[in-house]
Image (tube, rainbow, N blue to C red):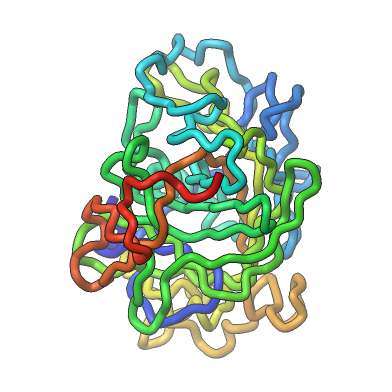
Amino acid sequence: MKIGGRYLVLSLGTLGAFGSLGALVAASCTFSACSSSSSSGGGGGTGMAPPCTEPDGGALPPGTFPPSNCDNSLQACTENGPNGACNLASCQSKAPGACQPLTDDTGKSTLNFRMRALNIAAPAVLAGSTIQGGVVTPAVSLNDMACGEEGTGTFNWLLQINKTANTVTTGGALTSTDPFNVGYCFYSATVGSSTVGPVTGPITFTGNTFTSMPFSGLLNIPLFAEAGEPPILLPIRNGVFNQVTLTSDNCIGSLNPASLDSTCVADPTTCSKWNTAGSLGGYMTLKDADNVNVSLLGESLCVLLTGSAKNAKNQCPASAFTMGDYCSTTQSAGGCGDSFWLSATFAASAAIISGTCAVDAGAGDSGSGDTGTPADGSSPADAATGG
């Protein structure tokens, strides 16, 4: 999908120079994770999944994470969908697991995943009705109706979990020509003055659940919509993966087939399509956000987040830089108010990751559908590392 004539990159780390944010902020949808009334988001329990908000329905405090398996849908699922079952028999799932794995990592020491659902919880302006349903969900979803997916597959967030070293490597990828047989490689490029590429950090396991330390480097997750355009960066610092459960070697969370009707379409307000089993968070400074041009709205991301009056450059006035809900210096809610907290939940399935693709971001590679040339010299079709 084209977003204001640009690409979207979700960044966990320090912001550099970048272009327009476009329609990332042109839309927003009520936050809804994926669960059914008979299965929790973690994929292994029963009963109703918890809501993604406070008990009184209010937003969670900045600096906190939503429950990894939370679900704000009605969780009113049926066994065969509201209008009959979606036929998933022709979906080319490559391995055991309830999350439509794109490859089989069973028994490997290094597990490779692609997010299949990303549900924004905060800030409210990004979690509201047009951005989640109109931008994030379609871009994360694959273009494969045989698997009940009617998206574009242009937002590819990858995780590589090394269970021996207790580390996670995460980053973005170009759109894959064949997610099941070719897979992905970590996208690496220079965009303006910003470095776009995977980052690695330590994780701590408790059973099959891990939490990461805050990432100290820059992480950019690209959404590619059209060839020849550089990505847009959304600046998130100190990104953390929180309470991420490996429901199997091939799954983080699971698909909820009961959400799909006979046309393989889900109604996220009634029954969520994916049971999530991990959450993430970080903060965006308003000065970083002021460098993001929301071209569709003719204002910076800072203006959008704060609701302040834009100046002649379509940016925030100096007074807006303390209007956030989070303070970067104290790493806590309120205080100096120089930032906004971002959090989300996600589900993921095993995927082929074949190294890092060094790409010239200005050479028209972005959004071409090519998986690029891995910097390690391997082919994108090579087997994933580990095991």
Closer to the camera, 383 or 43?
383
The image position of residue 127, as x and y in percent, is: 55, 52
Which residue is at the far bottom?
Answer: 318
> Is the C terminus in the top left, top right, bottom left or bottom right quadrant?
top right
Position of residue 293 measured from the top left corner of the image (x, y, whole percent) = 37, 74
Tell me where residue 297 appears, x and y as whole percent: 35, 67
Tell me the residue at 62%/21% (across/down): 76
Q: Residue at x 72, y 55 (%)?
A: 211
Is residue 297 something one can see in this rendering? no
Residue found at x 51% / y 68%: 219
The front one of 314 and 7 is: 7
Front in this rendered view, residue 249 or 305: 249
Figure quadrant of residue 281: bottom right
Q: Is residue 120 visible?
A: yes
267 up-or-down from 291: above or below: above
**Relative to 345, 316 lies left or right:** left
The answer to whether residue 199 is above or below residue 177 is: below
Residue at 39% in and 31% down: 149
Location of residue 243 with respect to 80 vertically, above or below: below
311 or 379: nearer the viewer: 379
Image mark count: 0
- Residue 74 in picture, x, y percent from top left: 63, 28
